[in-house]
Each structure stands twice: as structure tokens, then as C-alpha cells.
Image: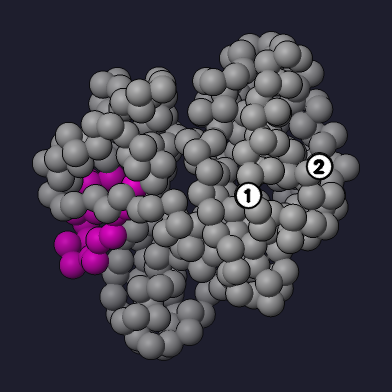
Amino acid sequence: MTVIAVIDLGSNSVRMTISRYHQDGHYEVVNRLQEMVRLSEGMGENKVLQPEAIKRTMNALKNFKETLDKYPKAKIRAVATAAVRQATNQMAFLTEFEETMGFTLQVLTGEEEAHYDYVGIVNTLNINDALILDTGGASAELILVRNKESVHEISLPIGAVTISEMFLEKDVINADSLFQATVALRQMFGDVSWLSDAMHLPLVALGGSNRTLAKISRRQRKITDMPIHGYHLSKQDATDIYQKILSKNLVERQKMAGLAKDRGDIIVGGLLPLVELLLFLGGQQVIFSQAGLREGILFETIRQETGQHVIAPEPASMTID
């Protein structure tokens, strides 16, 4: 039995999953931590990580280290995504991370991030053909899956925080601001040459903003016994919920059942890529995933170390976000 800790330092939140895996491919999660840190907040056009955002992140990581110290023999894999990837002060941040945690942080390329998303999903959801969308704080990964194989992977520099800061108001969203954000997204999607191959395919959605859509839907339907992992939502239901979110000011959004208060100011921007892809590609169904990058890293580690196929736990035990 081997213990492994995977730390995912994202643009909006930092998460850690500690798991045990066995030589036959079985694994179980033994601990999970997550904190919203908004690392990408205020980076601006110069892509500079801001002192307050760095301080929040390091404080969260110190809390993680207290838990990690309880597993002294654990393998550790720490990765960073879009915020650190794009940062012009990346080296200074990586140095501070190593001084704080005592080990190094790997900065993933956008393609590596997309690949791990694919591995996490294809091993936990029964999908054959689909378009995967992972909307983070500062990037969105798109993966086209055909016959369970990844045929195209790309990372785009748009996310819940970046879209919100570049285009949208924090309180009442103005129509002209939303239009500008929509046009920018459509132009970006239009530049992805292979995206037309995903016409009418189901959309597999992950990331905190996208999973919020599922949480709101479950609360509206008073569903308590169905996990978010594998939860389905029709295009009509998804756009109806988005319209309701749009109609509310910040205080009203923060009071919506299923929507975390600290996500209220970025949820409109965070859901815009999903909504636009549904309209752009004519998809009729969204399938939500709670597995993604951390699970992908775990699964690849299990295969490399044991040579076995991953044997995943039941969906109800997947990551809560």
C-alpha cells in the first residue's frame, strides 16, 4: 500500500487529495482539503501575481502542510496551472512555494492539464464520444473524446476570474458587458479548428463554476441522494438556471441555494464558456464530473507504479467541490 498526496494549485482555489493505492489497482481517498485563494486575482494584462493573492495562497498551503505532515511517508505531487503558468513573476513564486512547503511545485502546460483531466474522467465516467470542458479561474481546457480516446486537447486563457475581471461587473451584470464577453468567447472558440468536430456531442463539465450549476439544479429539484459525478442536465435546464443567475444582483446570487457565497461575483463569467459551447455546438446534454486533474495524476501514478488498471471507488466518494 502506498500513500500519495496530490496538490492542485489552481487560479481560483488550491486543493489537496491524499489517497492510498494498492498493487491490484484499488485506491481510496483518505483526506481532502480545499481553500478558495483567488491566486489569479488582479493579475491584469502584465500577468503579475499580486502580493495579497500570494499571501492568501501561502497561508492555505501552510494549513495543508499541517495535514500533510501526518503522512510522513507519502509520495507528493504538487502541480500548478494557469495562474502560475502565465505569471511573469513565476520564478519568485516557485521559490516561495518551495521555502514554505519543503518540496517543489511543477508548473503544468495547458496540454498536460487537459490530458490529466481526460485521464480522470475517462476512468470514472462511462463516456464514448464527448467534449470535455474544465473551466478554472484563469484557463479553460477542451478535450475532444472519440471512442474513449482523446483526439484533441487544448487550453485557452479564459476562466471564471479572468472573464469576470476583464468584462463583467461584480454586482448587476450589464447587457453590453455580457455581449463583449460573449463575442470574445465566440471568437476564441471559432479559432479552434477542430471544435466543429464536437457538434451535437454531450458536454462533460468540470471545475467549480460548472459544478455549481449541478448543485443549483439538485437543490431546485430537492435531490439529496444523487452525486454530482455523473449528474445530467439538459441544455434547456442549464440555460434556464443561467438566466436566473443573470437576473440577480450580487447579494441575490450569494443567497441562491447551491451557489457558494464566495463564488457569487464570478459565477456569471465562470458559466459563460459552458453556456456558449452549448449554443455554439448545438449540444443537448451536460454531464458533470467531480474527477479531473488530481484524479488523472493519481491514476497515471497507479498505472506506472503497479502496471494495473485503476479500480475506482463509487461515484458518491468522488471529490466534493
Foreground disc of the pair 2, 1? 1
Q: Residue at x 78, y 60 (%)?
A: 201
Whole-Å distance between the Cαs marked 2 and 1?
16 Å
User: Three-letter amino acid code at disc 1?
Assistant: Val
Callout 2–callout 1 Cβ contact below 8 Å: no
Image vertical order of residue 307 relative to residue 234, above or below: below
Q: Residue at x 51, y 28 (%)?
A: 162
Residue density around tag 2, few if under 14, some if 14–19, many if 20 or more, within 10 Å: some
User: Residue 218: x and y, percent?
Assistant: 75, 44
Relative side of 228 to 29, left or right: right
Task: Examine the rendering and report whether any part of residue 213 can be seen.
Answer: no
Bounds of the magenta span? 64-80
Q: Nearer the viewer, residue 181 or 173?
A: 181
Task: Examine the rendering and report whether any part of residue 11 can be seen.
Answer: yes
User: Residue 308: x and y, percent?
Assistant: 43, 87
Residue density around tag 1, few if under 14, some if 14–19, many if 20 or more, within 10 Å: few
Dot 2 falls on a residue whose secondary structure is: helix
Question: Residue 192 shows which numbered tag?
Answer: 1
User: Residue 140: x and y, percent?
Assistant: 55, 44
User: Residue 32: x and y, percent?
Assistant: 40, 52
State the residue position of label 2.
279
Scheme of image coloration = one colour
Which callout, 2 or 1, points at the residue further toward the start of the chain?
Answer: 1
Queried whether the magenta region covers residue 292, the answer comes back as no
User: Three-letter amino acid code at disc 2?
Assistant: Leu
Q: Nearer the viewer, residue 305 or 215?
A: 305
Tell me the quadrant of the picture where the N terminus can be found.
bottom left
Q: Residue at x 84, y 49 (%)?
A: 282
